[in-house]
Image (cartoon, rainbow, N blue to C red):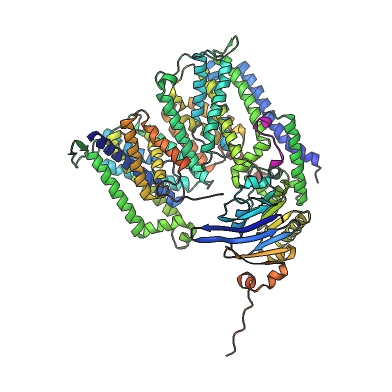
Amino acid sequence: MTLEVQNFSKRYGGLIAVDRVTLTATPGDITALIGPNGAGKTTLLNLISGVIMTDGGECLLFGESVAGRTPHELAHLGLTRTYQSPQLFDEMNVLETVMVGAHQHGTAGFISSMFRMRRTRKEETRLEEQALRAIERVGLPRSLLLRPAVDLAYGLQRRVEIARALAMQPRVVLLDEPAAGLNQQEKRELASLVQSLASDGLTVLLVEHDMDIVMGISQHVVVMNFGCKIAEGTPAEVQANQAVIDAYLGVEAEEPADA
Amino acid sequence: MAPVEDVRGRVARRYWRDVTGVACLAVIALAIGLTVTRSYYLSMLVYSAIFAIAALGMSLLFGFAGQISVGQAAFFGVGAYTSALLVMRLGLPPLLGMVCATALAGVFGWLVSRPLLRLTTNYLAMGTLAFGVICFIVFAQLRFITGGIDPGIVGLAPFSIGPIVLDEPRKMYWLVAMVLCIVMLLVINLVHSRIGRALKALKVSEVAAAGLGVDVVRCKVATFTLAAALTGLAGSLYAHFQTAFNATVFGVGLSIELLIMVVVGSVATPWGALFGALFVTILPSFLDDFEHYKLLVWGVVMSAVMIYMPDGFGKGVVDVAVSLFKRRRLK
Amino acid sequence: MAQFLQIVLAGISIGAIYSLAALGFTIVFNATKVTNFANGEFVMMGGLVAASLVSNAQWPVPAAVALAVVVVTALGIALDKFGVQQARRKTILGYAMVTIGASLLYRGIMQVSAGRDVLFLPNFGVLPDLRLFDVYFTSQSTWILLTLVIVSGALSYLFLRTRIGKAMRAASQSPRAAALCGIEPARMSALAFGMAAAAGALAGALVAPVGGAFFEYGLGFGLKGFAAAVLGGFGSPVGAVIGGLLIGLLESLSAGYLSSAYKDAVALAILLGLLLAWPSGLLGRVEARRV
C-alpha cells in the first residue's frame, strides 16, 4: 500500500467539494479516478499533492502520515503530479524544463553555482543525464531538446511534463487528465506510456475522462460524484455498477410506451 | 538522432556564449579605459557601471525569480551609508568598508525578505514600496547618523586600495569596470545553473516548482538577499565616487529607476540589466534640463514598454527583428 | 481635552481624503481585479489641476474643481482604455507594471505642466467655520466630511439600487456570465476607473486648500489610500471608508503626541504590518489562493 487516503474532505463555505473520500493505490498498478465534471477529482488531487489543505482525514505515503505537507515536502518523499493544463516554464527549452524535475537530486546552492565549482559542474552533468533519460523514457525525439517547451504541440507538451515528473525519479505519480486535448493516436501512445510507468513499479493515480483509456489500462477504478466516492473496483465491476451508470456512464434511452 | 554528446555541447555552448560575452565586455571596458580621456564621459560610465551592478541584482530578483520589489533604494542607501560611516567615523580602509557594506545590506535584505516574500504580486509591490519609503524617511530623519537631507554625508574620502587612491573618474572607472565584470560572471554562472532553472520555474508557477522539489521559500529569500547585497555594493561604490551625498538619493525614484533598467533592458537576460543601466544613466545627458522632464520621459518609456513589450524593450526589439527576418526568409 | 478633540478632528478630516482614495482602489479592484498603482495620482492631479487653474488662470474655484474632476476622470478612463485594456501581458504583474508606468507618466505630465511649486487652493468657503467648546470645525473640514458622506451615499445607491451598479457587481464576480447577459466587461472597467478617478480628484481638490497640491504628493496618497483599503478589508467599500478614517486618525494622533517627523511613516508602517500579519483587515474576506 503505497498511497492511502483516508477520509479526505474539503469544504468551501457551504459547498462540500470532497466528502470523506478514501482510496488506496499500490505500486505497479494504475488506479483511475473518474467521475463527472465537478465531482471533486481535481480537488482531491490537490489535497493529495499538498496544493490545498484537507479539512479532515489522513493520508499515508509509504506508511508515513503526510496530510498537510507542502508540495515541496511531498516531492522529497517521492510524490509528484502533472496538471490539467501543462504548467510548462516559458523561456526554458525542453531539456532545461525536464532538468528542473531533477532539481532535488542536486545540492548546488547559490554560492557554489555562482563560483561554478567543480563539484557543481559534475552535478550538472549528472542532472542533465537524468533528464535525458527521462526524455528518452517518454519517447520524445532528441531534435526537440533545445526547442522552447511552450512551442511544442499539445501532445508533446504533455510528454514533456511527464518527463519532467519522471526526472524526479518519483515513486508515486498523480496524472491529472493527461489525455485531454489529445487525438486518438496521441491517446494510444499516452496510454501505453502510462502503462509502462506502472510496469516499472511506479504507483500511478490517474484522473481521466477517456473511458477507453481508463478501462483499458487501469487495474483499479474509483468513481466520484458530488464529492463522494460512489463506487470502486476493477474496471469490469465499475462498469457494471448501477450507481456509476446512472451518474456517469449513461443510461439506455427507454422505448416510448405504446399508445 | 543526434548523439548525446552533441546535445550536451549545444547546451554548454549557450553558457560559454554568455561567458564570451563577459570576456567581450572586459575587452571593451579595457579599450574604453585606455582611449577615452574626457572625465565627463568616464563619469557617465562609472555611474552606469555602478547602477548596472544594482540592476543585476534586480534582474535576478525580478527578471528571473519574478519577485517585484520597488524598494531596492533602501539597500543602496544602506550600502552607501555603511561605507561612509565605517570609513569616516571608524577609519576603516575603504575596501573593508565596501565588504562590510555589501554584507550589511545583504543581511538587512535577508531580514526583511522572509516576511515580505510571503506576499503575492500586488501586495509585494505595495509592501516593498512602503518599505522603501519608510527607509527613506528614516535616512532623512536620523540626521545624527546619516546627516539627513541637509547636509548629508560630506567629505567621504574617495576609494583607495592601499596606497592607490581613486580620486579621479578615470581611476574609479577601472575599479567599477572590474567589479562589474566579476559580478556579471557570477550572475551568468548562477543563471546557467540548477538554481537559475529553479528561479525561472518558480517565476512561472511556484506550486509546480515546489511539487518538483524546489524549496521555493529558500530560493526567493536567497535571491532577495543577493539582490540586496549587490545593491549595497553599488551603493558603497557610489558613496566613494560621489564623496558627498544626502538622503534624497535613496528615494522612490531610484527604486523605480532600477526597475525601469531591468524592464527596458530585458527581463529574460542579465545583459538586459546592463543595457538598461546604460540607457537610464546616459539618456538624461541627451536632454537639456532633463530633471524637469525626467518623470515624463520615464513614464512614457515605462508605460509603452509595459503595455506593448512586457518582456522588456530589448526582448521586444529582438522579437520584432526575428519576426521580420522570418518573414523575409519565407518570401 | 480640546487639543485632543482638535487632533481627532484633524485626523478624521484627512482620513476622509484617504477614504476617498481607498474607495478608488476598491472600486477598480472589485470591477477588474487590478490594483491601480496610479490611484494616488488621481488625487494629486485633482488638486493640482484645480489649483493651477485658480492660481495661473484666475478661474473661480467651483469651475476649477469641476474641470479638474472632469479632466482627471478622462485620464482615468484613458488609463483603462489605452493602458490596462491594451496590455499585452494580461497577468496581475503585467497590469501592476502598466499602472506603475502610468503613475510615473501622470506625475511627469503634472510636473511639466503645473510646475514645481506647491500650489494651494483657497478655502471653498460658503460653509461657516464652527466653534464648539474650544474645538474648531473649519469650513474646509466640513466640506471634506460632507463630500465623503455624499460620495459614499451615492456609491452605495449606485451599487445596490441601480442597474448599472448591479451590472458592475455582476461583471466583477463572473465576467463571462455577465458578458453572456450582455454586460460588457470593458465598459464596466472603464466606468470603474472613471469613478475612482472622479472620487480621487474630488479628494485632491478638497485637501488642496489645507495641504497644498504638488506633483510628488501622489505617492503618499496612493500608499495611504491603499493602507486604508487594506485596513478596512480590501474589496469592501464600507471598509475603505472606515479604514481611511482610522488611518487619518492614527496618523494625526501619532503626529500630535509622538513625533511629527515620522508622520508619513505611520500609515506605511500600518500598511506593512497589515500585509504581513493581517491582510484580510477589518471587513475583508480572506481568499486562500494557491496558483
Tell me: residue B166, above or below residue A113: above
Residue at 69%, 29% (x, y): give it.
B19
Toward which corner of the image does residue B149 lie, by quadrant?
top left
Residue at 67%, 72% (x, y): give it.
A241
Tell me: residue A240, above or below residue B44: below
Query: Would residue B142 be found to the left or right of residue C1 on screen?
Result: right
**Residue C135 inside the magenta-drawn segment:** no
- Residue range in magenta is A103-114
Instruction: Find the residue positioned furthest to the top.
Output: B163
- Confirm whether residue B288 shows in the render: no
- Confirm whether residue A26 shows in the render: yes
Q: Give the x, y percent position of residue A206.
A: 68, 58
Q: Give the x, y percent position of residue A35.
A: 62, 65
Query: Would residue C169 be found to the left or right of residue B10 on screen?
Result: left
Residue nearest the viewer, comparing B327 with B118? B118
Q: Give the x, y percent position of residue B286.
A: 49, 26
Query: Would residue B148 be found to the left or right of residue B210 on screen?
Result: left
Instruction: Find the residue positioned furthest to the bottom.
Output: A259
Residue nearest the viewer, comparing C193 with A61? A61
